[in-house]
Amino acid sequence: MSYDATGISYLGAHIFDGGRIERYSTTHTDKVIQLYVSGDLYGWAEPDQGVVEFHVSDTDPAVVIFPLAVDRDNSDTDYFLDAFPEAAAHGNKIKIQMPQLMKYGVNDKWKVYRGDAGDASATLLIREQDLYPGGRHASGFGLGPFGYGGFGWDGSNAKGFGYYFGYGEFGFDCDMLEHITDALPPGDYPVKIIVEDEHGNESTAETDTVTLDTYARPASSLAVESYDEASDALELSWTESPDIT
């Protein structure tokens, strides 16, 4: 195999203005060490007495870094998708929102589509639901009684004036439909939203392309909670990544 992800240990980083110096030890003294930053090949270095250093410009702790030992003849070859397939599958998520405006009917449906990274259009249906679940509709000014929907613009569980300022009717609030995708690898994703009435008629599609350019933040605060020597049971705790569920 032309690469090896084992035998490389993290020695720490030195922070300085404009970046940091990442240091790794390696048992692969016959290979060069590549560094992948958020899925991109950042560069490679020759080991010096089993140690390599990289000057990384980004100091954000959320940036995910992977070292990889590769044959010298393949130092510029990008192996990320082959060597780290699990990491490549854990990307960020796309949040899609739409306000429940009064122009929509109680029987209308909200339909959300996306494409895969690099697709020209969004053809995969990822969410379909009633625009007003249970037939609930905004009541209108002054009903319900005044003030229940956010300074008089009524609607069950409305957030109140200013929460979604400008999205609702005449600048007042309304509830928001929301969909959050599964974690996705970096790329350009086409997104499409339509509203369909009870007769199957569809509105003009609202389309956009969302760019994901970083990987999910890693778990943090790993700690040993307890260890039972008799059963050799180790209990760990950690804070899950806010980007992966």
Image (cartoon, rainbow, N blue to C red):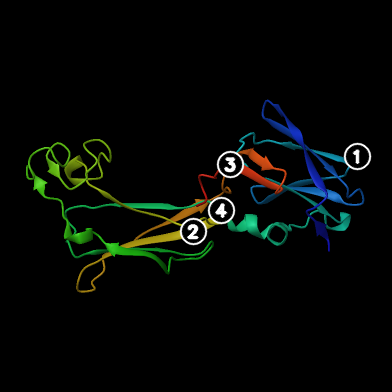
User: Tag 3: Cα neighbours inside 10 Å, few (<14), some, or many (≥20)?
Assistant: few
Q: Badges 1 and 3: C-beta atoms under 8 Å apart? A: no
Report the amino acid beneath label 1.
Asp
Q: Give the residue number, with chain letter if any, for mark 3.
A: 238
Q: Which residue lies furthest to the top in this view?
A: 17
Secondary structure beneath label 3: strand
As drawn, the label of residue 91 is 4
Q: Nearer the viewer, mark 2 or mark 4?
A: 4
**Percent position of residue 176, x then y:** 28, 49
Q: What residue type is labelled 4?
A: Gly
Q: Which of 78 and 92 is in front in this view?
A: 92
Query: Label 2 crowding class (10 Å Cα cut-off): few <14, some 14-19, many 20+?
Result: many
In 3D space, how far apart are the residues under numbered discs 2 and 4 (Cα atoms)?
Answer: 12 Å
Kindly report the distance in space between the C-alpha atoms of the residues bearing marks 1 and 3.
Answer: 35 Å
How far, Cα to Cα, is label 2 from label 1? 42 Å
Q: Are marks 2 and 1 in contact (CB under 8 Å)?
A: no
Q: Which label sits on residue 48?
A: 1
Q: Which of marks 1 and 3 is nearer the N terminus?
A: 1
Mark 2 or mark 4: name the one nearer the start of the chain.
4
Query: Where does the image place residue 44, in percent across and percent down from the top left?
Result: 80, 46
At 64% across and 33% down in the image, what residue appears?
59
Determine the residue positioned at 55% across, 56% down: 187
Instruction: Indicate the secondary structure of the residue bearing disc 1.
Output: loop
The residue at which mark 2 appears reads as 189
N-term-proximal mark, 1 vs 4: 1
Looking at the rendering, in which quadrant would you find the N terminus? bottom right
Mark number for residue 224?
none
For image coordinates 11% across by 39% down, the residue present is 152
